[in-house]
Image (cartoon, helix red, strand yellow):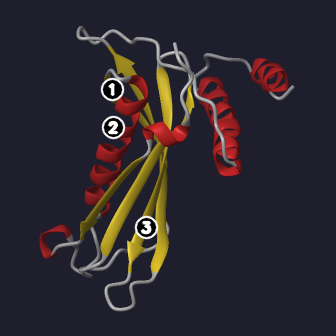
Amino acid sequence: MRVKTPKESRTIMTDMVLPSETNPLNNLFGGELLARMDRAASISARRHSRRITVTASVNHVAFNRSVPLGSVVTVEASVSRAFKTSMEIFIDVWMEDRFTGERTKANEAIYTFVAVDETGTPTEVPPLEPETEIEKERYAAALRRKQLSLVLAGKMKPSEATELRALFMQ
């Protein structure tokens, strides 16, 4: 399987916040933003794996800033790490001020997707090789997040996570 880079999975979706998508404070509903992020992450996972992909988990979401009515919202997603059948997708959400055009990072999220075949059975995905410094940071952090998740689920002992991390950091 050919090694791929994060830029090959990069997905950018831009849209405007409409009145039907806002809460009583005229800010984008959190659920609407989650749906937009899920769609972008799904496209990114499919671009990397070239398979059907399903959302396995929403690992982290940070609603750092409200996104007001009329704002232009850009969701940028790319694979930050590929494991055997799963992929971690890092998502950055940007908003553009409707009056000044200034672009500000509003939110971020980390989703996990699994590639499956036509019967829903998990299938292998290509390895990922980060290129930029931020891609390398996200790649390394993805392993730590996966190990923590396995430890918390009781599928890995904390000592095994430490040993694996030392092996990967050589």
* Residue at 63% in and 36% down: 142
* Residue at 63% in and 45% down: 135
Q: Quadrant of residue 127?
A: top right
* Residue at 79% in and 26% down: 165
Q: Is residue 81 left or right of residue 165?
A: left
Instruction: Determine contact: label 2, label 3, CB under 8 Å.
Output: no
Q: Is residue 162 left or right of residue 134?
A: right
Give the x, y percent position of residue 53.
33, 26
Q: Residue furthest bottom?
A: 99
* Amino acid carrying mark 1 in the image: Thr
Mark 2 or 3, nearer chain start: 2
Mark 2 or 1, nearer chain start: 2
Can residue 61 be seen here? no
Q: Please give the label number shown on residue 94.
A: 3
Please tell me whether residue 25 is drawn above or below residue 32 in the rendered image: below
Q: Please give the label number shown on residue 42.
A: 2
Please tell me whether residue 132 is drawn above or below residue 62 in the rendered image: above
Distance, label 2 to label 3, CA atoms, is: 18 Å
Pointer 1: what residue? 53
Please tell me whether residue 111 is drawn above or below residue 117 in the rendered image: below
* Amino acid carrying mark 3 in the image: Trp
